[in-house]
Amino acid sequence: MAANTNNSSQESPVRQLRLVVEATNFEAALAFYKDVLGLPLLESFEVDDSEARTAELANAGATLIASPRETPWRSLNSRLHAPTDLEITLFQELDAPEAASAQPRSE
Protein backbone atom coordinates (compact mmCIF):
# COMPACT_ATOMS: atom_id res chain seq x y z
CA MET A 1 0.00 0.00 0.00
CA ALA A 2 1.45 3.38 -1.03
CA ALA A 3 1.07 6.37 1.24
CA ASN A 4 0.13 9.76 -0.12
CA THR A 5 2.75 12.21 1.15
CA ASN A 6 1.00 15.23 -0.35
CA ASN A 7 -1.01 16.77 2.48
CA SER A 8 -2.47 19.53 0.32
CA SER A 9 -6.07 18.82 -0.57
CA GLN A 10 -6.38 22.00 -2.64
CA GLU A 11 -4.71 22.47 -6.01
CA SER A 12 -2.65 25.65 -6.35
CA PRO A 13 -4.30 28.33 -8.54
CA VAL A 14 -0.85 29.11 -9.97
CA ARG A 15 0.53 26.79 -12.64
CA GLN A 16 3.37 28.78 -14.19
CA LEU A 17 5.86 31.41 -13.04
CA ARG A 18 8.11 33.34 -15.37
CA LEU A 19 10.88 35.26 -13.69
CA VAL A 20 12.49 37.95 -15.80
CA VAL A 21 16.07 38.88 -14.94
CA GLU A 22 17.50 41.79 -16.89
CA ALA A 23 21.15 41.35 -17.81
CA THR A 24 23.48 43.27 -20.10
CA ASN A 25 25.11 39.99 -21.20
CA PHE A 26 22.31 37.46 -21.64
CA GLU A 27 24.52 34.56 -22.70
CA ALA A 28 26.79 34.96 -19.67
CA ALA A 29 23.82 35.20 -17.29
CA LEU A 30 22.17 32.13 -18.84
CA ALA A 31 25.38 30.13 -18.65
CA PHE A 32 25.87 31.11 -15.00
CA TYR A 33 22.35 30.36 -13.70
CA LYS A 34 21.64 27.32 -15.86
CA ASP A 35 25.01 25.70 -16.48
CA VAL A 36 27.10 26.76 -13.47
CA LEU A 37 24.45 26.86 -10.77
CA GLY A 38 22.36 24.15 -12.41
CA LEU A 39 19.07 25.87 -11.60
CA PRO A 40 16.20 23.77 -12.97
CA LEU A 41 12.65 24.92 -13.63
CA LEU A 42 10.78 23.87 -10.48
CA GLU A 43 7.43 25.62 -10.55
CA SER A 44 5.16 27.36 -13.00
CA PHE A 45 2.82 30.38 -12.71
CA GLU A 46 0.06 30.16 -15.35
CA VAL A 47 -3.38 30.95 -13.86
CA ASP A 48 -6.93 29.88 -14.76
CA ASP A 49 -8.46 33.35 -14.38
CA SER A 50 -6.07 36.21 -15.03
CA GLU A 51 -8.62 38.91 -14.21
CA ALA A 52 -9.60 37.40 -10.83
CA ARG A 53 -6.01 36.68 -9.75
CA THR A 54 -4.92 40.18 -10.80
CA ALA A 55 -7.67 41.68 -8.63
CA GLU A 56 -6.70 39.42 -5.70
CA LEU A 57 -3.04 40.46 -5.90
CA ALA A 58 -3.92 44.15 -6.25
CA ASN A 59 -6.22 43.89 -3.21
CA ALA A 60 -3.39 42.19 -1.29
CA GLY A 61 -0.95 45.05 -1.86
CA ALA A 62 0.51 44.67 -5.36
CA THR A 63 0.40 47.73 -7.62
CA LEU A 64 -1.31 47.25 -10.98
CA ILE A 65 0.96 48.16 -13.91
CA ALA A 66 -1.16 46.80 -16.77
CA SER A 67 -4.65 45.34 -16.51
CA PRO A 68 -5.37 41.97 -18.16
CA ARG A 69 -5.29 42.21 -21.93
CA GLU A 70 -5.22 39.69 -24.75
CA THR A 71 -1.91 39.24 -26.54
CA PRO A 72 -1.50 38.32 -30.23
CA TRP A 73 -0.50 34.80 -29.14
CA ARG A 74 -3.88 34.25 -27.36
CA SER A 75 -2.80 34.79 -23.76
CA LEU A 76 -4.52 37.09 -21.25
CA ASN A 77 -1.65 38.94 -19.52
CA SER A 78 -1.49 41.45 -16.68
CA ARG A 79 1.50 43.05 -14.94
CA LEU A 80 1.87 43.99 -11.30
CA HIS A 81 4.54 45.47 -9.08
CA ALA A 82 4.74 43.10 -6.11
CA PRO A 83 6.34 43.69 -2.72
CA THR A 84 10.16 43.55 -2.62
CA ASP A 85 10.44 45.38 -5.95
CA LEU A 86 9.46 42.44 -8.13
CA GLU A 87 7.40 42.91 -11.26
CA ILE A 88 5.26 39.91 -12.13
CA THR A 89 3.21 38.98 -15.16
CA LEU A 90 0.16 36.79 -14.75
CA PHE A 91 -1.05 34.98 -17.81
CA GLN A 92 -3.95 32.81 -18.76
CA GLU A 93 -3.68 30.77 -21.93
CA LEU A 94 -6.85 31.27 -23.98
CA ASP A 95 -8.44 28.66 -26.19
CA ALA A 96 -7.46 28.69 -29.84
CA PRO A 97 -9.88 30.68 -31.97
CA GLU A 98 -12.72 28.64 -33.38
CA ALA A 99 -12.17 27.37 -36.88
CA ALA A 100 -15.81 28.02 -37.73
CA SER A 101 -14.95 29.77 -40.98
CA ALA A 102 -13.11 26.66 -42.17
CA GLN A 103 -16.18 24.44 -41.73
CA PRO A 104 -18.78 24.22 -44.52
CA ARG A 105 -22.04 26.04 -43.84
CA SER A 106 -25.36 24.32 -44.30
CA GLU A 107 -27.93 26.27 -46.30
Image (cartoon, helix red, strand yellow):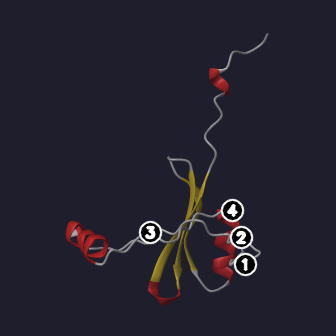
Residue type of the residue flagged with mark 1: Ser
Measured from the top left, where is residue 87 in percent x and y? 47, 77
Measured from the top left, where is residue 77 in percent x and y? 55, 61
Residue type of the residue flagged with mark 2: Glu
Looking at the image, residue 106 lies above or below residue 16: above
Disc nearest the viewer among 2 and 1: 1
Disc nearest the viewer among 4 and 1: 1
Q: Report the residue marked by disc 4.
A: 49
Give the number of the disc on residue 41.
Answer: 3
Give the number of the disc on residue 8.
Answer: 1
Q: Please tell me which of labels 4 and 2 falls first in the chain.
A: 2
Secondary structure type for disc 4? loop
89 vs 38, left or right, is: right
Q: Report the residue marked by disc 2.
A: 11
Which of the image's four quarters has the C terminus?
top right
- Marks 2 and 1: CB-CB under 8 Å? yes
Q: Please tell me which of labels 4 and 3 falls first in the chain.
A: 3
Residue type of the residue flagged with mark 4: Asp
Q: Please tell me which of labels 3 and 1 falls first in the chain.
A: 1
